[in-house]
């Protein structure tokens, strides 16, 4: 029985590649690819600075304004990368969000957006005190780290597959996972 299952698994159809040749061309020609390449590390830098400021505030009670502004900046960058990312997905894959190649990353991105938006709501309304707002920001940041890791691992796998294909064009392609 186990041997039959292993045999079936080895005959399984490979997953869809991250990009079809046509999608790769559209990706490479899109100005939104560069926008994403700039915004992603900028957002990560804002995250690191903000994380330090939020943790400092939670530890010492100092720097409330700086921590708050840093969360707002990080959230603005998140919104910018989400909007431009949706435009990029539309240009490359023909859908605004949830393209097959990035389905699960987009699903988690929705949770990230929801948590950052919850922070904004809490900040704007004062529904929870400042300490609770900063804890909410940390929860939002944890979801952001998970999402960033998803994208990093997906793109790294795609880069490796492309390098292998370039090294030996007769070798079977290695595919990125699909939803």
Image (cartoon, rainbow, N blue to C red):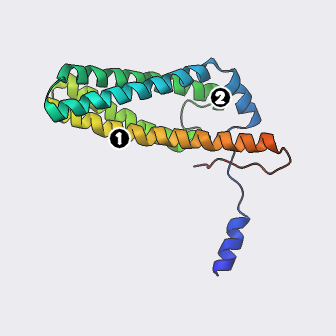
> Which residue position holds label 1?
142
Numbered label attached to residue 92: 2
Say few, some or many: other residues with alpha carbon within 10 Å of mark 2 (under 14 / 14 to 19 / 20 or more): many
What SS does tag 2 mark? helix
Residue lying at 24% horizontally and 34% vertically, measured from the top left: 55
Residue lying at 21% horizontally and 29% vertically, measured from the top left: 122
Residue 77 against residue 100 in the figure, above or below: above
Residue closer to the observer: 58 or 33: 58
Residue 81 against residue 155 in the figure, above or below: above
Q: Among all residues in the image, which is located at the extreme bottom?
A: 1
Residue 88 against residue 105 in the figure, above or below: above
Residue lying at 30% horizontally and 22% vertically, measured from the top left: 70
Say few, some or many: other residues with alpha carbon within 10 Å of mark 1 (under 14 / 14 to 19 / 20 or more): some
**Mark toward the start of the polypeptide (1 vs 2):** 2
Q: Among all residues in the image, which is located at the extreme top?
A: 31
x and y percentages locating residue 79 in the rendered image: 42, 24
Q: Is residue 147 left or right of residue 179?
A: left
x and y percentages locating residue 50 in the rendered image: 31, 27
Residue closer to the observer: 46 or 32: 46
């Amino acid at each position: 029985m186990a041997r039959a299952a292993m045999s079936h698994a080895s005959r399984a159809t490979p997953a869809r590649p991250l990009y079809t040749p046509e999608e790769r061309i559209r990706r490479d020609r899109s100005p939104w690819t560069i926008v994403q390449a700039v915004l992603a590390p900028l957002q990560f830098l804002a995250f690191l600075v903000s994380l330090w400021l939020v943790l400092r505030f939670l530890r010492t009670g100092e720097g409330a304004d700086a921590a708050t502004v840093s969360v707002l900046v990080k959230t603005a960058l998140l919104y910018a990368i989400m909007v431009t990312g949706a435009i990029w997905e539309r240009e490359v894959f023909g859908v605004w969000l949830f393209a097959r190649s990035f389905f699960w990353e987009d699903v988690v991105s929705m949770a990230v957006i929801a948590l950052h938006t919850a922070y904004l709501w809490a900040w704007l309304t004062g529904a929870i005190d400042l300490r609770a707002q900063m804890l909410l920001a940390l929860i939002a940041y944890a979801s952001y780290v998970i999402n960033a890791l998803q994208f990093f691992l997906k793109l790294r796998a795609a880069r490796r597959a492309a390098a292998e294909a370039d090294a030996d064009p007769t070798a079977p392609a290695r595919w990125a996972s699909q939803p």
